[in-house]
Image (cartoon, grey):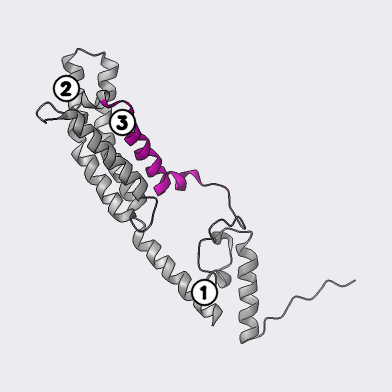
Amino acid sequence: MPPPRPRRRDSGSGSRLYILFDAFRLSQRLSPRHVPCHVRRHMPQCPHPQGSTRGALPVNWRRWAFSPAGIAILFIGAGILHFVRPARYAGIVPYMLPHPLLLVYVSGLAELAGGIGVLFPQTRIVAGRGLILLLIVVFPANVQMLVSARAADAPHWFEAILWLRLPVQGLLIAWVWRATLHGEPRDKQQHATCTTARGKLNA
């Protein structure tokens, strides 16, 4: 039996329908980087509908870690600890500031609000900016922790950890910016592209 002849791609609407069919078929199985160029330009990278598992790829842990969900878990957990163990946090409030326990509760509420806010696209930008500002404001508490440890003649290994903790604050700021503010213009452009493509296909 001779092998089946390949389909001929006619010009006009038939060719476009064939390409769109290829795009739909490949999008269910392949990552966009594996799709041919002549098909990729007809398949905008729209997210799957909420709750849909069709075409799901293996979990990308690096992408998940830099997502707003990772930020939310960190700050919601830290905010809860401010109310579970307030005395521990009150001990690292700089001595020149009054009402340390009240400041602990206020910072805990701010972390909870920011962690919840980054989960919603409508409040993600404001929450991200607020968390960055909060990380800058509470940085003196990290310095006070180091000063208190040196005054108490803490072990050298513990003092080394506190020294390493200082630049981590900058990494946290970069992490919040990367997860909540860096991808926002790209997300808006992607959403507009998906909306336009769907409108053309429905027309």
Amino acid type, mark 3: Phe
List the residue tagged with mark 1.
198
List the residue tagged with mark 3.
83
At which x and y percent is residue 144? 17, 26
Report the magenta residues as a range. 58-86
Task: Classify 201 as above or below 87.
Answer: below
Secondary structure category for the residue under label 1: helix
Q: Nearer the viewer, residue 144 or 118?
A: 118
Q: Nearer the viewer, residue 54 or 22?
A: 54
At which x and y percent is residue 105? 24, 34
List the residue tagged with mark 2.
147
Left or right: residue 5 versus residue 156 is: right
Amino acid type, mark 2: Val
Q: Is disc 3 surrounded by few (<14), some (14 to 19) or many (20+) residues within 10 Å?
A: some
User: What is the magenta segment's predominant secondary structure?
Assistant: helix
At which x and y percent is residue 71? 37, 43
Is residue 66 one of those drawn in magenta?
yes
Whole-number angstrom distance, CA of label 3 to CA of label 2: 24 Å
